Image (tube, helix red, strand yellow):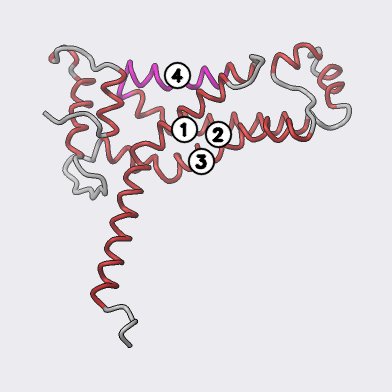
Amino acid sequence: SDLAPRPDEKVKESQFITKAAILFDAFLTRFWIWIVVITLFASGIAGQRMTGFRIIYMALFLVFLLTFQVSWKAWKKMMYGFWLTVIIYAMVILVLVYTYQFDRFPQYWSEYLNISETLQGDIGLEKYQTGDLFLHLAIPTIVVVMTVLQLHYFHSKFLALIEPPEGGNVEVDTPNVRQYENLEESDESPKSTKGKKSLFSKILSMTGLSKQE
């Protein structure tokens, strides 16, 4: 019938969906890592009381940024272990906060670990009502989910994007891969360059927002 879609229309629709999926995947590959980092920062400052849990979140955030700024090679090598550390740490927080809500668990911490209730609160262990408990469990849960996505779906593609293997034909869905080669050169031979890139300029280069020369 006349209402049935034509074959060429189906092909165009399929091509559009494919291109949209490639662009969306390219966008997430570039920017998901920074969304995770911002989540770490937000986890470190959220809440009315500063606790040990939040201090470690902030420490992880600072380690990421400082290593990224100081040594490009070290930053790339540590990324896999860094994401694993974040996942394990957030899961430990989930277990500790959840189990602390059971009866007599504060006493167990005091009796068997010799940690006073005041120190337990400073660490971040508190008794919560049902609504507050959900919010305090949501933060490490979000961190775990977002970091797992980064590690298993975007980590390898992100590394391939910023540094394709030499002598190999690597197909990357995102355009303008060559603009990231100057990042490697600036780390290997800093004396031959005019100066180290600033943190902000490195981020712009990696996300593809900087202007090409």
Give the distance between the C-alpha atoms of the residues marked 3 and 4, in whole angstroms: 19 Å
Region of the chain picked out in magenta, as a range: 56-73
The label on residue 36 is 1
Give the distance between the C-alpha atoms of the residues marked 2 and 1, in whole angstroms: 7 Å
| Dot placed on the residue nearer the N-terminal end, 2 or 1 | 1
Image position, residue 64 (x, y; %): 42, 22
| Dot placed on the residue nearer the N-terminal end, 2 or 4 | 4
Q: Which of marks 1 and 4 is in front?
A: 1
Give the distance between the C-alpha atoms of the residues marked 2 and 3, in whole angstroms: 8 Å
The label on residue 148 is 3
**Kind of residue at badge 1:** Val
Q: Which of marks 1 and 3 is in front?
A: 1
| Dot placed on the residue nearer the N-terminal end, 1 or 3 | 1
**Kind of residue at badge 4:** Val
User: Where, by quadrant of the figure, is residue 159 drawn?
Assistant: top left
Circles 1 and 3: CB atoms closer than 8 Å: no
Q: Nearer the viewer, mark 2 or mark 3?
A: 2
Circles 2 and 1: CB atoms closer than 8 Å: yes
| Dot placed on the residue nearer the N-terminal end, 3 or 4 | 4
Residue 1 relative to residue 130: left or right: left
| Dot placed on the residue nearer the N-terminal end, 1 or 4 | 1
